Amino acid sequence: MSGPRDWSPEEAPRRGVVRRILPVALVFAAVVGGVLYLGGDLRDLLGTEPGSARSAVAAARVYEESGPLGGRCAGLPEDLEADAAATLNALARCLDRMWAAALEPAGVDYESPGEVRLVGTPEEAACGTGDLDWAGIYCGEGRVVNVLVEDGPERREVFPMMFTLAHEYAHHVQTLVGISGRDGSEVFDEAWSRRLELQADCLAAAALRDVRPYLLNDLRRAVADGEETGATEEAASALRASHGSPRNGARWMLRGQKTGAVGDCNTWKAPEREVS
Ligand SMILES: [Zn+2]
C-alpha cells in the first residue's frame, strides 16, 4: 500500500505520492499516555520488535540526547502578513539555528536544507510537480524544502504557511538523522506515513512554540476541529490515511508545543490508536 504524502525520498522518487497539506490539517497527535515501557507481547504487536525498521527509528538517539526546540525568532518582521516571503525566509533562518542547537548535544552535525524554495505554483517546486494539491513538500533529492506562497486576495494567512515551513523542515531533519528513507516493506505503508507525518507536526509545533504562541494555539484548535479548505470527502479521507486524523494531529501538536522536547515527538513508540 502506498499513501499520498508531502515528502519524497532521496532515491527512486515515486510518482503521485504527494498530496496537499491542507493549511490547517497539517497536524496530528495522539493521546500519548505512559507507553514508555511496552511489554514484550505489545511490543511485537506494535511492530517494534528488535531488528524491525520501526524499532530502529523509535530508538534513534536524538530522542534522548537532543536539546529542546523553541525560542523566539528575533529576525521575524513585526507584521507577519506584510511580506509573506520575507517572513518565511526569516523563519527559515531561525529554524536552521534552532535545529543546529537542538541536535548538537546528540552529536548530529546539522546541515541546512539544500534550498528553501517559496513557490507561487506547484510546478515551480523541485519535486511533486505532477500533483497540484499540496501546500508544502520536502524533496529528498537535493534536500529542497518547498512551500506554496499564493499571492492576491485569496492568499491564506501567513502563520499556516509558517507551520508548513516548519513541518517540511521536520521532514528534512527526519532525513538527516536517518528516520526517513529507510528500507523495508513496512516503510511505505500508510501506517508508516502517519507516524512520519504526525511526528513532523509535533516537531513543527515544538519549533514554533515560542514564536507566536497564540497563533499556534489557534491553528491547533482549527486542526482539532477538522477544519479544511474546500477538500472533497475523498481528499479528506486520503489525507487522514496518510497524515492521521485531525484529532490526533492536534494532540501531537500539543505535545510538541508543551515541552519542545524531541523525545516527546516519538510517534514510532506510540500505539496505533495514537497515530490513526
Ligand atoms: Zn509532511
Image (cartoon, rainbow, N blue to C red):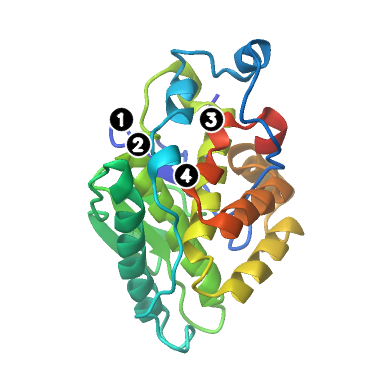
Secondary structure of residue under mark 1: loop
Left or right? Give the position of 71 relative to 257: left
**Precedes in sequence: disc 3 or disc 2:** 2
**Precedes in sequence: disc 4 or disc 3:** 4
Q: Amino acid at mark 2?
A: Pro
**Outermost residue toward the right in this view:** 225
Secondary structure of residue under mark 2: loop
> What's the CA distance linking mark 4 and mark 1?
14 Å
Nearer to us in this view, 69 or 246: 69
- Which label number is shown at residue 192? 3
- Which label number is shown at residue 18? 4
Q: Are marks 2 and 1 in contact (CB under 8 Å)?
A: yes
> What's the CA distance linking mark 3 and mark 1?
18 Å
- Which label number is shown at residue 9? 2
Left or right? Give the position of 218 relative to 146: right
**Precedes in sequence: disc 3 or disc 1:** 1
Q: Is residue 128 visible?
A: no
Relative to 255, is 242 above or below?
above
- Which label number is shown at residue 12? 1
Secondary structure of residue under mark 4: loop
Relative to 29, is 12 above or below?
above
